[in-house]
Amino acid sequence: MNIVERYKKPTPKFFKTLRNIGIALATAGGAIIAAPITMPALVISIATYMTVAGTVATAISQAVVTDKDNSKTEANATVDGL
């Protein structure tokens, strides 16, 4: 399964929620970083980490798919082929 096929399949409910939380974190962090006022370095540092964590959580959550086919996974097919 390539990345395009993976992104087209349905995402489980838990990971949809996690994806939305990641989007919110990334947006809030980006807004704090882009604010036109001077903020302490600690706040900017935390906002940077929020942005990175939100972006990673969003990307990983979007790549998780529901496997409706319970016959064999790709890992089992590879192991069976050895």
Image (cartoon, rainbow, N blue to C red):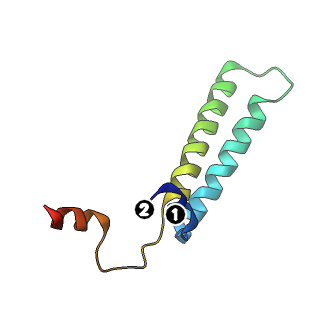
What is the three-letter code of the residue carrying label 1?
Answer: Glu
- Indicate left or right for 69 with 25 as reference: left
> What percent of the width, then of the height, locates residue 44?
69, 26
Residue 76 bears which disc, if any?
none
**Amino acid type at image mark 2:** Met
Which residue bears the numbered disc 2? 1
How many numbered discs? 2
- Could you say which is closer to the camera, residue 11 or residue 13? 11
Name the secondary structure under disc 2: loop
Residue 35 location in percent, x, y? 82, 29
Check the image and report above or below for 49 versus 66: above
Q: Secondary structure at mark 1?
A: helix
| Along the line of sight, the residue nearer the viewer: 60 or 32 | 60
Instruction: Residue under label 1, please give it.
Output: 5
Question: Residue visible at 60% across and 43% down?
Answer: 55
Disc 1 packing (10 Å; few <14; some 14–19; many ≥20): few
Residue 40 x %, y %: 72, 20
Q: Quadrant of residue 67?
A: bottom left
Spatial CA distance of label 1 from label 2 is 6 Å
Along the horizontal axis of the image, is 16 left or right of 3?
A: right
Residue nearest the viewer, comparing 25 with 80? 80
**Mark 1 in CB contact with mark 2 (< 8 angstroms):** yes
Towards the viewer: 41 or 11: 11
Residue at screen point 56% across, 50% down: 59
